[in-house]
């Protein structure tokens, strides 16, 4: 199959979308734009920005996209014993999300969704392409990858000792993400990029490439 590639700056990185020649990638970029507008901590008008400005005890209505990511984050926080924490230790129990209603329970509660929202955005972009009838393709958001259909995407891992990238695997019908923690990289393969992205933090912080949470999300991990 002949592929065409397009790239745009979203989510703090350059996002590449690959689709069959003659098809449009516009739906994917629109999905990425939507997630960034709702979950960027740098935008005071985003759901995340508005939550950070709330006084204790106040609440707001968030977009369904944001609510889905917050529910996933809470699920992973509880299942990992706090290894995954979108408040970065400031107030792990300082927020509550019920449906789309987000309430601030602690003054220090504020979110950095960078460790999960980028993966979610990749999944949204893939779903948008599929909804447009795209049979195959990929989305690469600065190393958070997902391929679908007949697309095959080479995975390169950074070799710090050699100061270069080395071939590692080929991604087909699934997701792959890598995170750096101190001096080590953690990579995770999973069916959805949301879980691949988030689980890299659990693996990196725990130092355990066989963390028991991986099986629950049909994921595999590597430390390198």
Image (spheres, rainbow, N blue to C red):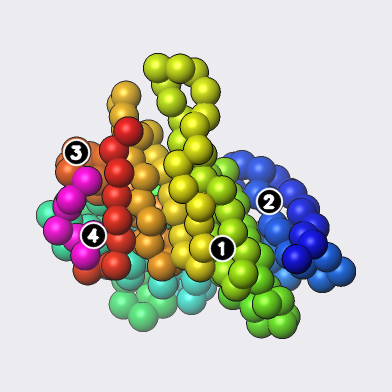
Which range is magenta? Answer: 209-215
For mark 3, does the 10 Å Cα neighbourhood hold few (<14), some (14 to 19), or many (20 or more) residues? some
Could you tell me residue 83's position as x and y percent? 20, 48
Labels 2 and 3: the sequence-earlier one? 2
The answer to whether residue 58 is seen in the rendering is no
Labels 4 and 1: the sequence-earlier one? 1
Q: Tell me how far mark 2 sits from mark 4, CA to CA.
A: 27 Å
Q: Is residue 92 above or below residue 21?
A: above
Could you tell me residue 133's position as x and y percent? 72, 82
Residue denoted by label 1: 147
Q: What is the quadrant of the C terminus in the image?
A: top left
For mark 2, does the 10 Å Cα neighbourhood hold few (<14), some (14 to 19), or many (20 or more) residues? many
Q: Is residue 63 magenta?
A: no
Residue drawn 30% across the image and 61% down it: 219
Labels 2 and 1: the sequence-earlier one? 2
Residue 10 is left or right of residue 101, and the answer is right
Residue denoted by label 3: 207
Q: Tell me how far mark 3 sits from mark 1, CA to CA.
A: 27 Å
Residue denoted by label 4: 214
Residue denoted by label 2: 16
Dots 2, 1 in contact, CB < 8 A: no
Dot 1 lies on which element?
Answer: strand
Labels 2 and 4: the sequence-earlier one? 2
């Amino acid at each position: 199959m002949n592929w065409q590639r397009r790239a745009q700056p979203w989510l703090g990185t350059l996002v590449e979308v690959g689709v069959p020649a003659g098809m449009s990638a516009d739906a994917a970029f629109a999905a990425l734009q939507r997630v960034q507008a709702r979950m960027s901590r740098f935008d005071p008008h985003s759901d995340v920005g508005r939550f950070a400005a709330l006084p204790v005890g106040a609440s707001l209505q968030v977009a369904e996209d944001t609510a889905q990511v917050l529910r996933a984050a809470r699920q992973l926080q509880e299942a990992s014993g706090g290894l995954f924490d979108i408040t970065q230790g400031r107030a792990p129990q300082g927020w509550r999300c019920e449906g789309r209603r987000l309430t601030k329970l602690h003054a220090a509660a504020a979110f950095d969704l960078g460790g999960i929202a980028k993966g979610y955005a990749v999944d949204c972009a893939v779903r948008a392409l599929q909804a447009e009838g795209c049979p195959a393709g990929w989305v690469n958001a600065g190393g958070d990858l997902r391929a679908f259909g007949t697309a095959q995407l080479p995975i390169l891992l950074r070799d710090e000792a050699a100061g270069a990238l080395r071939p590692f695997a080929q991604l087909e019908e699934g997701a792959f993400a890598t995170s750096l923690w101190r001096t080590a990289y953690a990579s995770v393969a999973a069916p959805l990029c949301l879980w691949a992205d988030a689980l890299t933090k659990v693996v990196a912080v725990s130092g355990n490439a066989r963390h028991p949470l991986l099986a629950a999300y049909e994921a595999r991990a590597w430390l390198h």
